[in-house]
Amino acid sequence: HLRVEHLRRTKDRISGNADVYLTNYDRIHKITDLSKVDVVVFDELTKAKNPSSARIKTFRPLLEPRHWRWGLTGTPRPNTLLELFAQIRLLDDGKRLGPSFHAFRNRWFEQVDYHGFRFKPREGAERAILEKIADFTLTLRSSDWLDVPDTVVEDVPVIMPEHVRKVYRTLEKELLALIDGKEVLAVNAAVLVNKLLQVASGEVYVTDDQDSTKRTVQRVHGAKMAKLVDLLTPLHEQGENVIIACNYVHERKRICGAFGAVDAHAYEGNLELDWNAGKIRTLVADPRGLGHGLNLQ
């Protein structure tokens, strides 16, 4: 029953014709009016942890005392307590930790290096800071609410064939390699990392000989697929359902073809309900796309 508008489709203007308006942090500075909004929800609030963010500085003056503000995050302080300041100020206009980041830092932290890049909390600072924000902060800990088995992490090495190692080393050194006559080119360091990951995965994107704007997939080796067979066989024999995370479309296609797995990104049914009901034996997905809006137990 809710009417939803994506602001990027309406030139970032809040029309007043919807119940929910959606945008992201990259476009938040383009909003110029919040008069038709009652509640502002900041999902993944740590994206606003930088007190010098120009986008947040542009947006903050639009917030009024009448606005309810909610901040949601699973990692409120991923690196340091200093990262709490900008997030809390966005929600309370500086009432609890003060309006100035430098004043906050000078009060609760001390410098530990000569150049002033690293700070550590003063004695008792953490308790005092958490007490100041306790009145409007709710923390749910998995240990208090979830009864699930511990996660077991097991690294399974896959040995690349020697001829593939030579290709890998050549590409790493020269940014160019030939695979069965097909040219694999990395134009910069970032592309190189991606190409090396593809070679390790077993297939790599190469430029089409006839059309430089098209890409084709070149097979390199089958070592990872063979290892995946070894991993999946006992799990399937035990009746376990399996999610396989991978980076590339060609990996998903390969795995779906080999095991009859379901591609999460092409599934036409209700993925969450069908997975939780045990209807999907093997699911393949890119974790960057699977992590939003799903509760796969």
Image: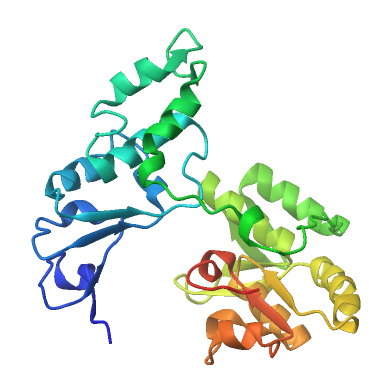
Image coordinates for residue 144, horizontal then vertical, percent: 63, 55
Residue 106 versus residue 273 in the image, above or below: above
Image coordinates for residue 14, horizontal then vertical, percent: 13, 67
- Which residue is rendered at x = 10% and y = 65% of the image? 36
Q: Determine whether, in the image, residue 242 is placed left or right of residue 108.
A: right
* Visible residue check, residue 26: no
Residue 253 or residue 244, whichever sits in front: 244
Residue 188 versus residue 112 in the image, above or below: below
Residue 109 or residue 285, whichever sits in front: 109
In the rendered image, the quadrant that contains the N terminus is: bottom left
In the rendered image, the quadrant that contains the C terminus is: bottom right
* Visible residue check, residue 39: yes
Image coordinates for residue 157, horizontal then vertical, percent: 85, 55
- Which residue is rendered at x = 45% and y = 52% of the image? 73
Q: In the figure, residue 109 lies in which quadrant?
A: top left
Image coordinates for residue 136, horizontal then vertical, percent: 36, 46
Q: Determine whether, in the image, residue 110 is placed left or right of residue 106.
A: right
Q: Determine whether, in the image, residue 155 is placed left or right of residue 289.
A: right
